[in-house]
Image: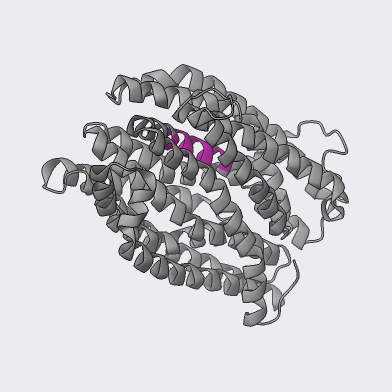
Amino acid sequence: MNQTFSRKGKIKQLLIILIPILITQLAMFSMNFFDTMMSGHYSSKDLAGVAIGSSLWMPVFTGLSGILLAVTPIVAQSYGGRKREEVAFSVIQGVYLAIIMAIIVLIAGGLALNPILSTMKLETIVHEKAHDYLVALSYGIIPLFIYNVIRSFIDALGKTRVTMLITLLALPINIIFNYLLIFGKLGFPELGGVGAGYATAITYWLITLIAIFIIHKHSSFSTFGIFQKLYFVSLSKWKEILLIGIPIGFAIFFETSIFAAVTLFMSNFNTTTIAAHQAALNFASFLYMIPLSISMALTIVVGFEIGANRYKDAKQYSWIGITIAVIMAFLCGVILFLLRTEVAAIYTKDLEVVQLTAQFLIYAIFFQLSDAIQAPVQGALRGYKDVNITFIMALISYWIIGLPFGYYLANYTSWGAFGYWIGLIVGLAIGAICLISRLIHVQRKNLFMEKKNAV
């Protein structure tokens, strides 16, 4: 990653970093996508079970791995400030935290999973499928969390093509094991949707081992000495990671857990509605990888510029990223509207589920427009290490505004299940407006300090 001197140069460098991140995110999410889709082709019960299991897992994973995202701005600013000696130490401390967090998740999951599923009043078979899918997936939690730290290190250096290649290598393996374990091919046991959990766990192990091998052998990373020296636990570095990471993690958790909460409320509807809702939500989350990837790219480039005290460049990058996200959201919205029935048919052969999913996908279009603003803004703010406001706004927009309003519409108006989606869209839009205001404030503050220091 290098300093740029023009808008054209910034767009080029941002795209060089962004495109591999986008491909990586789409590929990683494709694991969940193929879990859901292939389970749906096995049976609608397996679709509902895996979808519910995924909806419970994703907020936990994204929230806790969000804490580990603090490694990205920390490494990016150290790299931009030419403090290479700090990088390996920060990464190893992140790995220590990742292992501890993964163990905590395993223990908590073992205690809370059945009670949570029991509150959802699911059909017995759907309950069992969701439980067993998550148990299978749990075998890959420790390597997955470690991989998130390694990936943050690699991406912070601007080498996003490397993580893209790792993920692209792992994706076909995930699909193959899905096929073998879901449908019981080539002598493997026929596990249905549960097989998707084992396939994904295997893939997580492979991704992590490949990443460790690369940072040992590739000259771009081996010079930093990651895993080449034993470091003792540093509470001060943990504190730095947690002070930045916890607000990031909570912001992501509040955003993703809201969908798990909606799923809990959706359990009052029939299995067809649950399956359609989860299928539409799965595809909406798939599209969310675009603004999320832009967000991650902005954290890297903004953090790099802030580390070098180039505040005007950081500001330019922020607005370039937001503009790209909005344009992409409009394009995806048009395509989704025209092909919503075809998209719904990807998930199931059940005609009733297809028709209902297509209706839910109309609301997903409006999700994309608000996400196109709030996600890149969050990424830019993380580059500035300004993370507390994103946590506060996620709490307010989703849990104080979105969910209560959605609950009212779903239960006291004729909107039914669609009411939850409308409520979340409203909350998301309010959050996006507030985050834009915060970004403008931070940018003005930094530019003022730059001028003051120049004088």
Does the image show residue 250? no
Residue at 64% x, 60% y is: 20
* Nearer to me, 179 or 66: 179
* Nearer to me, 240 or 259: 259
Using the rendered view, name the quadrant where residue 425 is placed: bottom left
Using the rendered view, name the quadrant where residue 90 is placed: top right
Residue at 42% x, 33% y is: 50
- In the image: residue 376, left or right of residue 397: right
Residue 433, x across and y down, in percent = 38, 63
Residue at 36% x, 42% y is: 259
Q: Which residues are magenta?
A: 54-65
Residue 408, x across and y down, in percent = 18, 44
* Nearer to me, 278 or 427: 278
Name the quadrant of the N terminus: bottom right
Residue at 53% x, 36% y is: 179
- In the image: residue 53, left or right of residue 340: right
Is residue 59 found inside the magenta-colored segment of the image? yes
